[in-house]
Image: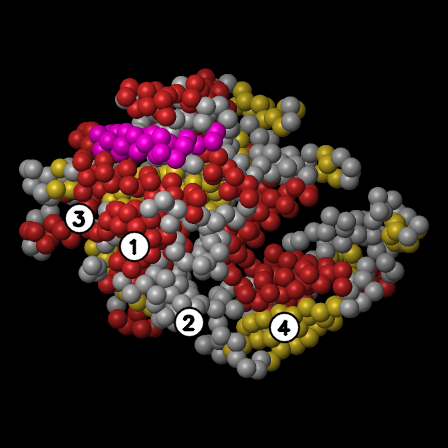
């Protein structure tokens, strides 16, 4: 199949199977389809029969499995084929919190996006019994997750993606809402508030609202004041989003056996603890017959057949996929939920000569997605008759679920007779990259952002490529009527739409979708605050399960923009450095030269009998500036061996990715040992990791990589104070008093009573 150069480039970088040395295994896009089809069919009794059928479904980009499936199926890579995870409930204790952090790291490493509900963590200032201290609150632990995600992202090829949620009645909800008010805060999180029906009723009634944790009311405020804070933050900073959590749980097919408190990063998959869901999209633009004519219509028979095949393919992936955690595998196989959706909806409208957001587009959305929904449920019932229902199926409560009651009576009867293979079947996911591969069809149910765009691609060798990208339906129109023909009025892009147009399509789609929808309502920068709030009020009134908006703002800028391509002179002078906006990443780590220059630093930590030696080697970048390249940490103290090896490998991996790596210093210096730190050379250092961060910072300053006081941010308040502290003996890590003594084998302060053993 001949595809345009840009689509081929994205396929080559993201989904084409290659040997470790870069030699392609997939020679063509057809080879990728065949690899995926053979792999997914391998769990069937007659693989050859189904492989051909699965191949035909993907042929011509009619069915688009999600990126994890395209990249991982039929390879020997230790990756998951699932895109979406919600992690386990975070226990409100330190060991449980860091076990949850480890599980998140493992899942992100294998390519899964994750969601977490932080409502289970006690609010800031709450008493932590047993250690006599105050809790730091959910937002502080989100910063730990954010640092972990940034490290995983820096060491791998795929950007980490996380969703963090908190309930609207949690005492720290205001801190959560304000957390992204400054640039650079929690950048690896999407954030949403779990809004309940009683809260929305309190907002409407202008009633008081209690902030509660573990049965204790911490504070009471006006519901409208909290709602305005949520709205103001979203207006100014594009976050948090809003999830109508009671509606999600009430309408869940599995309402009888699970409670949902979080979603995957883009919000289309509300999932229970350890829930997992895979994604796939039917390309509606490829199913339009006689485009741009009076006879234009979607081939409903083709949609029905394609849906049945897609359901079987995705059900097979549940058995085929690896899972980062056993709990995720058990949850997925017990419920077998899948998220089949659509892409190319806006292009399909254009090919049918229908304006996005019009009454006719709403009618078509509901008609097409109802056909897909019914075909998916019928196919899943047939699979249940052949292979068995999902293990958690309980006919009586399942048949009473909101979506099941909307199905045609014959499907309901068959569910009662045979059961159903997949607990939930439909979802509308973001399809940005796979839609680009499918010759730039419109993404998901979003409108076309721009009919012509300029995209930049950063290749594996660091070279920069520029591509002019044309929307699929727009290109077909130009091929049919010529470049000089007038574009009809129904050709509207996102810039020409009103919020009502977005909401009408989202609400129509939600009526046919049993999970949820990834949909962003793009708003102009000059939208007034009251008009902005009205969007969310209407989303709730129209029975949407959530609402996400984007309005350009000073903190996040504009996620998407319509602009002219840069001049040849500007492109030639641009530095070859990774970018965020408009760039598709595919960079490789820097190669290590045979010999490097560096320095070794000696670090004394009070609680260790042996010194720690930190070696930092540097390279010269293209501008002639020295930059850190790798780190080695050595000590005779074997207690720290495993984590120092892991730390050096992780930091070195980050350094070799290039870019601004100064955040490594800040993350290390922010680590606090729960047992307390020490006063070292006149200043308090909260942990040995923070001390290592100080050393790395001093090295960066010494080589000119950082312009910062080498003493760092924790220096004593004054030279006199520093001198006095420096002359004293061992200092208490809590109060700083120079009277720390050893008593009964334990460090004890005779000033404040602090004890390392107590």
Marks 1,4: beta carbons within 8 A: no
Q: Residue at x 59, y 26 (%)?
A: 211
Q: Could you say which is closer to the camera, residue 623 or residue 586?
A: 586
- Determine whether, in the image, residue 342 is placed left or right of residue 195: left
Image quarter where the N terminus lies is: bottom left
In the rendered image, which residue does mark 1 sit on? Answer: 33
Which residue is under mark 2? 21
**Left of 488 or right of it: where is 575?**
right
> Residue 11, percent across and down?
31, 59
Label located before the other in sequence (1 or 2):
2
Q: Residue at x 29, y 63 (%)?
A: 9
Query: Along the polypeptide, which appears first: circle 1 or circle 3?
Result: 1
Pick whichever of labels 4 and 2 is earlier in the sequence: 2
In the image shown, does 718 or 222 lie closer to the viewer?
222
Q: CA distance from mark 1 to mark 2?
A: 22 Å
Residue 694 at least partly seen? no
The local secondary structure at tag 4 comes to strand
Distance of mark 3 from mark 4, alpha carbons? 54 Å
* Residue shown at 87% from the left, 61% from the top: 728
**Distance in Å between CA atoms under marks 4 and 2:** 29 Å
Q: Residue at x 49, y 79 (%)?
A: 624
């Amino acid at each position: 199949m001949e595809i345009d150069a840009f689509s081929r480039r994205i396929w080559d970088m993201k989904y084409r199977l290659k040997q470790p040395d870069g030699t392609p295994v997939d020679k063509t896009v057809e080879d990728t389809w065949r690899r995926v089809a053979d792999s997914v069919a391998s769990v069937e009794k007659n693989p050859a029969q189904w492989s051909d059928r699965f191949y035909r479904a993907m042929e011509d980009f009619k069915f688009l499995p999600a990126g994890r499936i395209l990249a991982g199926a039929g390879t020997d890579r230790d990756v998951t084929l699932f895109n979406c995870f919600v992690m386990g409930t975070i226990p409100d204790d330190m060991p449980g919190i860091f076990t949850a952090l480890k599980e998140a790291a493992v899942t992100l490493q294998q390519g899964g996006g994750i969601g977490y509900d932080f409502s289970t963590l006690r609010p800031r200032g709450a008493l932590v019994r047993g250690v006599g201290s105050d809790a730091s609150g959910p937002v502080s632990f989100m910063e730990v997750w954010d640092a972990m995600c940034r490290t995983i992202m820096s060491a791998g090829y795929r950007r980490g993606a996380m969703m963090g949620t908190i309930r609207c009645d949690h005492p720290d909800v205001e801190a959560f809402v304000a957390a992204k008010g400054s640039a650079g805060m929690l950048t690896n999180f999407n954030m949403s508030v779990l809004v309940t029906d009683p809260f929305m009723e309190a907002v409407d009634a202008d009633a008081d609202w209690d902030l509660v944790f573990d049965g204790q009311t911490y504070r009471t405020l006006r519901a409208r004041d909290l709602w305005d804070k949520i709205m103001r933050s979203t207006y100014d900073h594009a976050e948090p989003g809003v999830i109508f959590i009671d509606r999600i749980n009430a309408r869940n097919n599995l309402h009888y056996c699970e409670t949902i408190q979080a979603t995957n990063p883009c919000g289309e998959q509300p999932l229970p603890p350890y829930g997992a869901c895979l994604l796939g999209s039917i390309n509606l633009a490829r199913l339009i017959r006689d485009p741009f004519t009076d006879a234009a219509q979607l081939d409903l028979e083709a949609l029905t057949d394609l849906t049945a095949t897609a359901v079987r393919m995705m059900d097979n992936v549940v058995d085929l996929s690896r899972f980062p955690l056993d709990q995720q595998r058990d949850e997925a196989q017990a419920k077998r939920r899948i998220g089949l959706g659509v892409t190319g909806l806006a292009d399909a409208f254009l090919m049918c000569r229908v304006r996005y957001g019009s009454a006719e587009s709403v009618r078509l959305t509901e008609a097409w997605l109802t056909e897909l929904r019914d075909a998916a449920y019928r196919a899943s019932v047939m699979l249940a008759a052949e292979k068995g229902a999902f293990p958690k199926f309980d006919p009586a409560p399942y048949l009473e679920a909101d979506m099941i009651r909307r199905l045609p009576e014959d499907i309901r009867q068959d569910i009662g007779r045979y059961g159903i293979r997949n607990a939930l079947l439909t979802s509308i996911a973001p399809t940005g990259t796979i839609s680009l591969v499918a010759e730039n069809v419109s993404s998901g149910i979003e409108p076309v952002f721009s009919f012509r765009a300029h995209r930049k691609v950063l290749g594996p060798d660091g070279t920069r490529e520029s591509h002019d990208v044309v929307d699929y339906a727009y290109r077909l129109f130009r091929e049919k009527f010529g470049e000089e023909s007038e574009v009809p009025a129904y050709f509207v892009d996102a810039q020409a739409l009103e919020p009502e147009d977005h909401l009408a399509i989202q609400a129509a789609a939600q009526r046919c979708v049993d999970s949820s929808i990834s949909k962003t309502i793009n708003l102009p920068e000059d939208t007034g605050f009251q008009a902005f709030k009205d969007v969310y009020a209407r989303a709730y009134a129209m029975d949407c399960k959530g609402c996400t908006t984007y309005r350009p703002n000073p903190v996040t800028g504009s996620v998407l923009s319509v602009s002219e391509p840069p001049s040849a002179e500007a492109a030639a002078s641009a530095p070859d450095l990774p970018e965020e906006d408009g760039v598709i990443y595919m960079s490789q780590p820097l190669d290590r030269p045979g010999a490097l220059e560096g320095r070794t630093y000696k670090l004394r930590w009070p609680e260790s009998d042996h010194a720690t030696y930190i070696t930092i080697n540097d390279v010269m970048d293209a501008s002639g500036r020295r930059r850190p390249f790798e780190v080695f940490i050595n000590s005779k103290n074997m207690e720290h061996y495993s984590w120092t090896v892991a730390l050096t490998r992780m930091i070195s991996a980050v350094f070799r990715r290039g870019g601004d790596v100064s955040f490594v210093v800040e993350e290390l210096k922010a680590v606090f040992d729960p047992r307390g730190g020490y006063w070292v050379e006149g200043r308090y250092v909260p942990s040995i990791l923070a001390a290592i961060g100080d050393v790395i910072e001093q090295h960066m300053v010494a080589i000119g990589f950082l312009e910062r006081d080498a003493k760092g941010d924790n220096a004593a308040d004054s030279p006199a104070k520093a001198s006095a502290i420096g002359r004293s003996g061992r200092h208490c890590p809590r109060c700083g008093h120079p009277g720390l003594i050893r008593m009964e084998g334990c460090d004890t302060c005779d000033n404040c009573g602090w004890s390392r053993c107590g």
